[in-house]
């Protein structure tokens, strides 16, 4: 068949083959000699359901990132310059993405499997982590950051701010409310720092007067918050959509969440 | 050529239906660049959530429009070149495709399927979405089956002749589709439908993703190959020349058949649960696609040079000046030419995505939609637009009003794509995520998540999106304006798809027989996928329970 093919076409086939082969050689070279590779199976890695940070050597730490609708834990990690992180990533619900911007750490978080990447942070600065796989209506609020400084020594996970919020001491009910806030996913839409998410921020919410879609002005008190949690569509704050689901919470749990909301100033 | 009346009606409906929904597809394309740049800072506009609209944009533009067009175009080509078609199957297929598409669209626009066109579980949609998709795909199979008997018959009555290149091209496109849709049919029918109906509690997420991309990459070629059929057969004719080489066309189609399935893992480079060795093997197999791609680039350029030569074009480069870039009699030419120009960038950037470790820099960033808008929304979409206009008007006896304006559309559209994709490329390199309502967080200056480094790129994309929308407004105006003109019977009766002759009409047996290539394609697909799938099944996956996109609380049973 080769002898029947047009002369110029033969040249095209040969050129294309050589270019492809050269390209593949460079990819293989980078993978084998520069260790620039892609995630692979972690068959011995156990699934985990809480974030973790542990030392595994000199300047080397293992961090367990937990992705869920719609936040990462830890939300903020502070590490000294020169730290190597073995990053393990798990999801508790749907697929998420995990991209540390300006680095080659680019992972998918898939429920039921653990993903892994290793990165050494040699430059100080703030590294943004962005969820880049669609994971539901709060997807755009899902991010985290790693701060690399030349000052600190690495704190344990308890001392790291695992989720944004003030460090003040909370009542027992408020702490329980904070746990519910994180675990039931309120955190995905209601920020603590004034950011407008898919829902209004909890910052300064208690005692504020909110304008509803129909122009009505309502004081945020116990009764309003109970109604908003039990019947999310009853009244919608101006500028937001009717997207909040009914979260199955007991009256007691709702009271705890409200105790927590009161502390977010 | 006189096409039977039922075929005219079905073909017209198959093009008209997705074109009507395309109005929404384009509207939400524009809305997306506005949301993404922060020009809109809201979760929804006019009752349509960003992600609901995005699902519609993807499903309508990339699945419904492309598949309906490929089927309608195939029906005409088969009837025109083979002289007949199996009418009953054509009708059954049309019913299945319309029913399936309606079900899918209902699920999306009633807010029950905001899961994007990749529908990865454990995000759960209403069963109507999955069942609609399955019905639609089975409809495309039946359409293909309506061609098999006429082609066999033709081969029997013409034992000495080669199957016409256009027929071979569209036939191979659907063989590829038939093979590639089996894994996704398994994913949908065996895993997702029972789970969405509440019959099973969990779904194996890694397996679902792998079965999806087993289908997902051939889907790309299913978009592309009808455009290739036009490039090889229609473009040389409308340029005023001949196809440089008949062999090149056959070689390209058959190579795509062989190498479009066994490389889908290159969409899952960042996934856990799949070995990096198999990701590497799929990278190698992907690179082989360079052969038919380069062959096509050469052959099309050579065919254009021949057309330019006949029009007096000479020299090494000077002949480029002699092509019919803006001639009313050859108004289809710009639809092909402008698409091919964007395709150069689309192809080159695709090499980045497919290159194993290099992909880590851009995986799932806005680089990805930038790339595929220069392939599917560039060459593929423009070829579909041009040929749809040609078919719908011609077959219904209408004349294209204002051919000059019609030629403005593809150039404006391509310019818009170049601008929009430049914005998305730049943003992607700085980590801008795809599929994200960025106006609510990253592009909202009042938010602590605000990313000033993404402002320029997302605004550039917005400018491009506006230019593209303008092109489409002109297109829709022209289509309606021309359809409203008086019907001229002689146009309808003389309508046919322009097919080119070959300059080099080689007689090479290896590219004239289909069977070995089909067997090879099935074997390649099985060999490349059996080991990773066996390993996924062995690892097991506790699976996802199911979530609707609006709530972090698991969704049991059928989503409301």
Image (spheres, coloured by chain):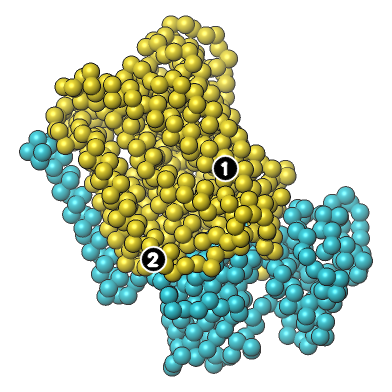
Asked whether B517 or A102 is in front, the reply is B517
Q: Which residue is mark 1?
A: B131
Asked whether B427 or B326 is in front, the reply is B427
Compared across the picture, whether B295 is left or right of B216 comes to left
Q: Would you identify the image quadrant in which residue B309 lies? A: top left
Q: Residue at x 52, y 9 (%)?
A: B487
Q: Name the mark on residue B535.
A: 2
Chain A: colour as depicted: cyan
Instruction: Find numbered disc 2 in the image and state the secondary structure of the residue it sits on.
Output: helix
> On the rendered image, what quadrant is the C terminus of chain A found in?
bottom right
Precedes in sequence: disc 1 or disc 2? 1
Q: Residue at x 64, y 54 (%)?
A: B198
| Image spot of residue A213 (x, y percent) | 84, 51
Q: Are marks 1 and 2 on the same chain?
A: yes
| Image spot of residue A6 (x, y percent) | 12, 36
> On the rendered image, what quadrant is the N terminus of chain A found in?
top left
Q: Chain of mark 2?
A: B
Instruction: Find numbered disc 1 in the image and state the secondary structure of the residue it sits on.
Output: helix
């Amino acid at each position: 068949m080769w002898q029947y093919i047009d002369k110029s076409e033969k040249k095209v086939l040969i050129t294309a083959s050589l270019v492809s082969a050269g390209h593949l050689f460079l990819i293989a070279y980078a993978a084998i000699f520069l260790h620039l590779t892609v995630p692979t199976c972690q068959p011995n890695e156990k699934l985990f359901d809480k974030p973790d940070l542990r030392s595994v050597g000199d300047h080397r730490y293992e961090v367990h990132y937990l992705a869920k609708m719609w936040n990462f834990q830890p939300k903020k990690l502070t590490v000294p310059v020169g730290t190597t992180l073995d990053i393990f990533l798990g999801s508790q619900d749907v697929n998420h993405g995990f991209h540390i911007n300006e680095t080659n750490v680019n992972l998918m978080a898939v429920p039921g499997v653990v993903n892994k990447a290793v990165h050494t942070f040699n430059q100080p600065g703030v590294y943004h982590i962005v969820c880049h796989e669609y994971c539901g209506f709060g997807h755009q609020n899902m991010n985290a950051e790693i701060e690399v400084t030349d000052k600190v020594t690495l704190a344990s996970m308890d001392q790291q701010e695992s989720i944004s919020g003030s460090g003040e001491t909370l009542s027992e009910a408020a702490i329980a409310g904070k746990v519910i806030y994180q675990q039931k996913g309120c955190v995905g839409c209601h920020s603590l720092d004034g950011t407008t998410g898919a829902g209004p921020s909890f910052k300064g919410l208690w005692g504020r007067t909110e304008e509803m879609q129909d122009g009505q002005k309502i004081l945020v008190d116990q009764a309003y918050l109970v109604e908003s949690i039990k019947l999310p569509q009853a009244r919608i704050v101006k500028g937001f959509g009717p997207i909040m689901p009914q979260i199955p919470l007991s009256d007691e749990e709702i009271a705890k969440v409200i105790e927590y909301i009161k502390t977010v100033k | 050529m006189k096409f039977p009346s039922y075929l005219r009606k079905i073909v017209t409906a198959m093009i008209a239906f997705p074109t009507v929904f395309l109005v929404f597809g384009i509207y939400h394309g524009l809305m997306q660049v506005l949301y993404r740049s922060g020009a809109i800072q809201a979760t929804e506009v006019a009752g349509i959530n960003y992600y609901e609209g995005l699902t519609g944009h993807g499903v309508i533009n990339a699945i419904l429009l492309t598949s309906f067009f490929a089927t309608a175009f195939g029906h005409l080509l088969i009837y025109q070149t083979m002289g007949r078609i199996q009418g009953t199957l054509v009708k059954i297929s049309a019913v299945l495709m319309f029913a399936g598409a309606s079900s899918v669209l209902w699920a999306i626009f009633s807010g029950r399927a905001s899961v994007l066109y990749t529908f990865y579980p454990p995000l759960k949609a209403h069963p109507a979405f999955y069942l609609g998709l399955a019905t639609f795909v089975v409809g495309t199979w039946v359409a293909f089956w309506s061609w098999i008997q006429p082609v066999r018959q033709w081969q029997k009555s013409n034992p000495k002749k080669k199957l016409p290149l256009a027929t071979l091209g569209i036939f191979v496109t659907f063989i590829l589709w038939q093979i590639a849709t089996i894994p996704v049919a398994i994913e949908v029918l065996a895993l997702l439908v029972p789970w969405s109906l509440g019959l099973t509690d969990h779904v194996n997420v890694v397996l679902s993703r792998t079965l999806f991309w087993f289908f997902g990459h051939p889907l790309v070629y299913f978009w592309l190959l009808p455009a290739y059929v036009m490039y090889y057969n229609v473009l040389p004719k409308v340029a005023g020349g001949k196809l440089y080489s008949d062999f090149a066309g056959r070689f390209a189609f058959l190579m795509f058949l062989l190498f479009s399935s066994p490389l889908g893992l290159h969409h899952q480079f960042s996934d856990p649960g799949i070995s990096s060795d198999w990701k590497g093997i799929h990278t190698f197999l992907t690179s082989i696609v360079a052969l038919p791609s380069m062959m096509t680039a050469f052959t099309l350029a050579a065919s254009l040079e021949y057309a330019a030569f006949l029009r007096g074009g000479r020299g090494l480069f000077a002949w480029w000046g002699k092509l019919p870039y803006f001639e009313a009699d050859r108004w289809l030419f710009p639809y092909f030419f402008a698409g091919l120009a964007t395709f150069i960038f689309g192809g080159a950037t695709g090499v980045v995505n497919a290159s194993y470790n290099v992909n880590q820099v851009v995986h799932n960033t806005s680089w990805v939609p930038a790339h595929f808008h220069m392939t599917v929304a560039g060459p593929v979409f423009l070829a579909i637009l041009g040929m749809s206009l040609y078919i719908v008007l011609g077959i219904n006896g209408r004349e294209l009003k204002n051919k000059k304006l019609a030629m403005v559309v593809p150039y404006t559209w391509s310019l818009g794509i170049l601008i929009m994709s430049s914005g998305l490329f730049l943003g992607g390199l700085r980590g801008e995520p795809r599929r994200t309502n960025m106006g609510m967080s990253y592009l909202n200056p009042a938010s602590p998540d605000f990313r000033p480094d993404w402002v320029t790129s997302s605004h550039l994309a917005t400018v491009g999106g506006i230019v593209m929308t303008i092109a489409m407004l002109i297109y829709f105006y022209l289509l309606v304006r021309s359809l409203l003109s008086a019907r001229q019977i002689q146009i309808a009766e003389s309508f046919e798809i322009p097919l080119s002759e070959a300059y080099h009409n080689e007689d090479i047996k290896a590219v004239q027989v289909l069977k070995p290539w089909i067997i090879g394609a099935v074997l390649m697909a099985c060999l490349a996928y059996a080991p990773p799938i066996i390993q996924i099944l062995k690892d097991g996956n506790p699976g996802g329970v199911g979530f609707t996109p609006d709530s972090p609380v698991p969704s049991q049973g059928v989503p409301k």
